Image (spheres, helix red, strand yellow):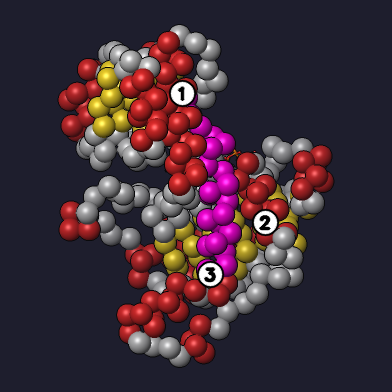
Amino acid sequence: MKIIVTERIADDGIEHLKKDGHEVDVKYGISHEELLQIIQNYDSIIVRSVTKINEELITKGTNLKVVGRAGNGVDNIDLPACTKRGIIVVNTPESNSMAAAELAVGLAYAIFRNIPQAHWAGKDKKDFRRNKFLGNELDQKTVGVIGLGRIGSIVASKLKGSNMRAIAYDPYITDEKFDKLGVERCETLNDLLGQADLITIHTPKTAETINIINEEQIKLCKEGVRIVNAARGGLVNEAALYNGIKSGKVAAAALDVLSPEPNYDKKPEDQDYENKLFELDNVIITPHLGASTDEANYNVGTCVAELVADALRGDMVAAV
Ligand code: NAD
Ligand code: MLT
């Protein structure tokens, strides 16, 4: 069968599909408009988080049988539209959890100690005045985890290892899991906001979680709170965050995800992307790097290829 892969996955994944007898077209960075023109030629499409599998694409993809999401979040895929057409959607939710959790922890350290800012001041401007980069310790502070699922749990454990007190807000997780992780449950989001020195968000992007941190929530935070979002752009309202940083209420933020996101496959000269958050020195931004480790790439690429091949063969798969 014919499979199109629109975002970078591990070569081993592509090889797996070819060995299974499929014809694979690798078209990294293809535009939505181009994809609409050719999607009817394919039985399956493999994407990460940038390609939008919307209703229009599904309607034009008259031969589509399987959508493979190389990674975790499926907020870029119109699941009801796929279901209506009988298209199977598979993803690989566990294969990059460690990578994403490690990045979130790294971002927390980076914003507590101003590591990127200090590096670039020295490298770009020969400004080595270290008094400009006085930070704070994570030790004995409180981390508030919003969403204690796969990634949130790892982040909580790792930061407890940094001697932080861990609290979390997740109404869908049992008390047993909180107890097992040694994390204190917050009954409400407001309860978490009033206690956390560091807030780190690990929910999916749903109607309920979009803008989960907005102007009103920022008002309820501790003075000098720091915020990490390595989950999805739009969970933290960017205008509210901008104002929170400008007012000094939020000491710093680290974002691995934005809303909207830049095109991660375009060269700088072809990039047409503006975001006011880049103006702020105490906001650090990484290009959706959460899953970008060799290990996660390999896991995600091979796992999605196996799932897509199984589904195309008619074997049982765990669909989303
Ligand atoms: P998960 O499904 O295992 O956990 C999400 C948790 O959020 C669940 O426990 C759920 O109960 C909780 N939740 C849902 N709605 C909530 C709400 N309104 N309030 C509080 N909690 C709520 O997901 P995961 O695998 O841990 O992934 C977490 C996020 O990280 C997702 O958005 C995913 O797309 C994203 N992610 C980002 C990267 C990256 O590269 N930056 C990599 C992997 C995953
Ligand atoms: C994911 O949801 O798996 C991550 O955001 C990583 C990605 O898709 O690049």
| The residue at label 3 has a CB less than 8 Å from ligand 1 | no
Q: Would you say 47 lies left or right of 304 here?
A: left
Residue marked by disc 2: 158
Residue marked by disc 3: 111
Quarter of image, ligand 1: top right
Residue 220 is situated, as x and y percent measured from the top left of the image, at 63, 63
Can the viewer see residue 233? no
**The magenta stretch spans residue 102:** yes
Q: Residue at x 32, y 80 (%)?
A: 124
Q: Residue at x 35, y 49 (%)?
A: 260
The amino acid marked with disc number 1 is Glu
- Whether the residues at callouts 1 and 2 have beta carbons within 8 Å, the answer is no
Residue marked by disc 1: 306
Can the viewer see residue 303? yes
Mark 1 to mark 3: distance in Å? 38 Å
SS state under label 2: helix
Say which quadrant the N terminus sits in: top left
Earlier residue among tags 1 and 2: 2
Earlier residue among tags 3 and 2: 3
In which image quadrant can residue 304 be found? Answer: top left
SS state under label 1: helix
Category of crowding for the residue at label 1, using alpha-carbon neighbours closer than 10 angstroms: few (below 14), some (14–19), many (at least 20) = some
Q: Would you say 42 lies left or right of 246 here?
A: left
Q: Is residue 229 above or below residue 210?
A: below
The amino acid marked with disc number 3 is Ile
Indicate which label's residue lies in the foreground, 1 or 3: 1
SS state under label 3: helix
